[in-house]
Every structure is written in structure tokens, then in C-alpha cells.
Image (tube, rainbow, N blue to C red):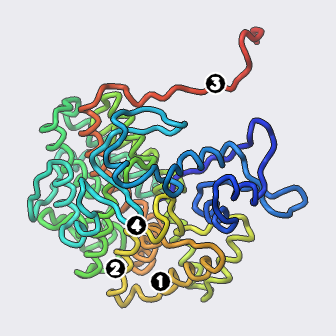
Amino acid sequence: MTDDAADGTSGSGQRLSTRETADRLGVKSETVYAYVSRGLLTSRRAPGGRGSTFDPDEVDALARRSGRGRPGGDGTAADRAAGSGGDGLSDGTLTARTGITLIDTDRYYFRGVDACALAARYGYEETAAWLWTGELTPGIRFTAPPESLAAARRAVEALPEHSGLVDRLRAATIAAAVTDPLRFDLSAPTVLAAAPALIATLVGALPVRETDAGDEPETTLAEQLWPRLTRRPADQASVRVLDAALTLLIDHDLAASTLAARVAASARANPYAVVSAGLGAVDGPLHGAASGLAHRLLTEVLERGSAAAVVADQLREGRRIPGLGHRLYPGEDPRARMLFGLLAELPRAAPALAAAREVVETTARYTPLHANVDLALAVLSVSAGMPAEAGETVFAVARTAGWIAHALEEYQERPLRLRPSGHYTGPTPPQPLP
């Protein structure tokens, strides 16, 4: 789930060579290309086709963000945990206080607790409820109110047959909202009552792919989601991987969709509207939908029997290799590392897992790229016979809990605080009337 990278040209029109870019950033040329692969920099072919050029404004912005740490960071973990004591714009970067997630080098934490350790010990629903309240309730289950579920299913069934799963989640969210007369009550108890009901409604509104499967409200959310993603029967080990993926994806600091959700909450939008804002940002191929690209990549590798040929074709067409690199981790994404470990215990995941590792090894020949969570989700979806959009669906369902956590936090802040000022670059007024 990567973020978009800006593409632009310096106001001076003079672009930097690879060497000049490396010197300005204080890194090697190879690292510059690694930044490009991770989406941190945008390159263009130099005139004549020799080498690459870079926008100096974008390079300078990356240098400012790097600070004392790696690109994408902002100092040490202690610095980030302590914060600056305020919110706003600093060097062009929007910052906001949050006590939910801390990302540090090769690990990340939910409220100070290692997120991977949480996923190894507890399920999605237990972790989500703990993140909201600070209290752990073993065995907690999310259930959908009958009226909300019925309305959501009607809304989903009314969509065209070709509608995607995330399209259905959006429709279900709106339908669930209008059945809740208390949705405009933003007090914590009311939001905490609506949140688990909404998540259960979203999953329950998705069509079941297994013809003989029925509603089982007593099962975990992962068990309910499984038959909505694949026709293959569920087994305990496979559902465990899905549940771990949901837990690991609950939150990841202020990613694009989370920022959208917090902006909505800052305007005092109700929790359903906050989730709708998050789902809107998920739609891009550089965020929630990135796992679908990795799914198609692995499928092609398995069909052709060679990662090298597929990687070569991707690069020849000017496309990034999906599922590799993350701007917040210098090494392997900890979420991918944990999911790969669980997938290694599934015999039917072996071919897709081997293909993913071959992609990593092939691409890392010249640039130090590592697998991210999108590639791990692709291994799960390919090996389980799920559609390419399955990873995006898992991400959206999982992240709903994180958006709610951020909404609860934002509701306690000053309203409309997330309001950056625009930097006007249009014609100097006054201009003649058109």
C-alpha cells in the first residue's frame, strides 16, 4: 500500500542528473534508483536517452523529509514518539499528533505494542477493540444489526454485476449509515457501539462465493470473510493467515486513506462518512489497490515459469515492480515478513511463495528492494484462488478499524485543524475578465 509520488519540474526548468541528485541527498547513485523504485523520487529520461534526470524541488523535499534518518522518516523513534508538541505544516509536510501507530526502522507499534506480536497472539476483532478502548476482550465477535445488514445487502445487490468488491463496501457503508439514527452522535460510547456493527455489516453484505455457505455470526470475522473471497473451502491454517493479515493492516500511521479519514473527522463528519472518505482514498493503484497489481504479476510469473522474463517486461514497459519497497522501511516490511512465515506453513501456497521470492531476488540484483505487504497479500490471494481485488478488500475491511480509531482520536482535537494553506502558483492578479 504505497503512496503516490509527485511528478513535476523545478520552477527553474533545470533538472538534476543522477550524480547531482545523489550528491544532494548524500547517497550513492544506486540508492537514488532504489528511491525511484519505492516511489520516493520521479525520474525522466535525459535528452538522447542516456541516464535519468530529477526535479530539484522534489529532491530537496526528500532531503528535508530525511532529516537525520532515512527518507520517509523524521528523526529517531524517540523524536517521533515525543513529537514536536504541535500540529501543522513543517517544510511542506503535514503533521498531526497521534497516539495510535509508531513506525520505527523495521518494526511498527500499536499504542506502543509490537503490532506483529499482537497479530501472533490475538485476532482481528480482539486487536481492533483493544485499539479503540485500551481494554482487551478475549473472544470478542463483531455482529451486524439485522436492519443494517438487510439495507446493505439490498444496496450491494442493486449494483451492476461487474461491480468490484470495494465498490460494494462503499455502497454498504452508505446504506448502513442511513439505518443508524444515532450516527451524528460523535460521543465515544456511541461511536464504539457503531464501529463493530459497521465492520460486520461490510463483510456480511459481500456476496458469498460458496453456494452452501450461510451466515455464521458466531464465527470470527476472518471466517466470515473467507467464503466471500474464494470458493475454495477454508481450513484453519489458511484462515489464520487471513486473520493475521487483517490484524496487521488495521493501521499504518497517516497513510493516504487514514489522512482522508482524519480530515473528514476533523470536519466532524460521522463515523460512516469517515469510513467512506477512507474508502475513497483506497481506490488508487498506489495505495489499497497495489496488491492487485502484485497478484497479476505473480500469476504471470507462475504461467510463464520465469520471474526474470516478467520483471524484464515490466521494466521495458516503464512500469514499477509491484510489491517491492516501502518508503517507511529500509528493509523488509515487517507485515510481509510475518505473513510469509505463516504462508510457508501452507503447502498450496508454496508455488506462489516461491514465485514471490524469485521476483524479489531478480529485482534485488542491482537495487536493494525488499518485499512489502502487497506482495504477501498477493501470495495469499493467488494461492487461495481469490480474485486480484481480494487484497484490496482485505485491506479496506482491516483498515476500517484503524479509521475509526483515528476518528475517535480526531474528535477530541480542535475542529478543522487539518487545514493546510494553499501555495498559489496561478497568474498574478488582477487579470482581465474572461
The answer to which of 69 and 202 lies nearer the viewer is 69
SS for dot 3:
loop
Circle 1 crowding by C-alpha within 10 Å: few under 14, some 14–19, many from 20? many
Q: x, y (%) of residue 5?
A: 60, 50
Q: CA distance from mark 3 to mark 2?
A: 54 Å
- Front disc: 1 or 3: 3
Q: Amino acid at mark 1?
A: Ala
SS for dot 2:
loop
Q: Residue at x 31, y 64 (%)?
A: 248
Q: x, y (%) of residue 235?
A: 25, 82
Q: CA distance from mark 3 to mark 4?
A: 38 Å
Q: Quadrant of residue 303?
A: bottom right
Q: Amino acid at mark 2?
A: Arg
The numbered mark at residue 232 is 2
Q: Relative to 173, is 216 above or below?
A: below
- Front disc: 1 or 2: 1
Q: Which residue is mark 4?
A: 106
Q: Specify whether 184 is left or right of 294.
A: left
Q: CA distance from mark 1 to mark 4?
A: 24 Å
Q: Which residue is mark 3?
A: 424
SS for dot 4:
loop
